Amino acid sequence: MTKKSSKTDTKASKSATKDKKSGIPASGAKGVQAAGEAKADAAHIRTVNNALVDHHYLSEEEFQTVAETLQRNLATTISLYLKFKKYHWDIRGRFFRDLHLAYDEFIEMIFPGIDEQAERLVALGGSPIAAPADIARYSVIQVPSETVRDARTQVADLVSDLSRIGKGYRDDSQTVDDANDPATADMYNGYAATVDKIRWMLQAIMDDDRLN
């Protein structure tokens, strides 16, 4: 071993010791993947500070049903937020100001649902997805990677997405209600009403011959 490498090893060792004292792992804590179809079941993870995590009044089967909908709707809501922001930044033309401001108003309407759905999943013994790849995998809509300037193209695309999302919430409300979770069903009914309202407003904007 050379003197140089010896000094390097000593420095690394001191750094590791410092990290140990601070309680912060040098390369990040090792994660544990949640189980189940939706990769959401955290109730049975054998790790620290997880002993009291359970599915409350839901059976394992009921939880898996509810968790699948929550993971998907959480990812979809995050994607919808990002899509509104993308179009907010891209819009050009006669309707720039109207849509630039409207998209942020719609974001304010849907944004609380992100945390609410994630925390509902946690309260039932789940673990919400957050990685971009997982969000893209579970979401029922896609955030465009290309630039879209045209107002009518943007609005028509959003109306189509919102139609899919609204129907999804109504279907999922019935699904989770059948799975003994009326609380989540009530949440979904509220989100469906919000999505339907935004869809109606955007559809009304499309009913204008001047929309480029």
Image (cartoon, rainbow, N blue to C red):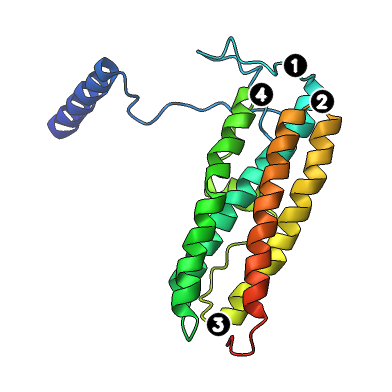
Which residue is under mark 4? Answer: 124
Give the x, y percent position of residue 3: 13, 30
CA distance separating discs 3 and 2 = 45 Å
Between 64 and 119, the one lying in front of the other is 119
How dense is the environment of label 3, judged by Cα within 10 Å: few (below 14), some, or many (20 and up)? Answer: some
The residue under label 1 is 57
| Image quarter in which the N terminus is found | top left
* Numbered disc 1: secondary structure: loop
Image quarter in which the C terminus is found: bottom right
Residue 78 relative to residue 63: left or right:
left
Which is nearer the N-term, disc 4 or disc 2?
Answer: 4
Which residue is pictured at 68% across the width and 38% down the height?
187
Q: Which residue is mark 3?
A: 150
Depth check: give the residue in front, 99 or 71.
99
Using a 10 Å C-alpha cutoff, classify the residue at mark 1 as few (fewer than 14 neighbours), some (14 to 19) or many (20 or more).
Answer: few
Residue, x 75% and y 36% (percent of image)? 185
Q: Is residue 157 visible?
A: no
Residue denoted by label 2: 180
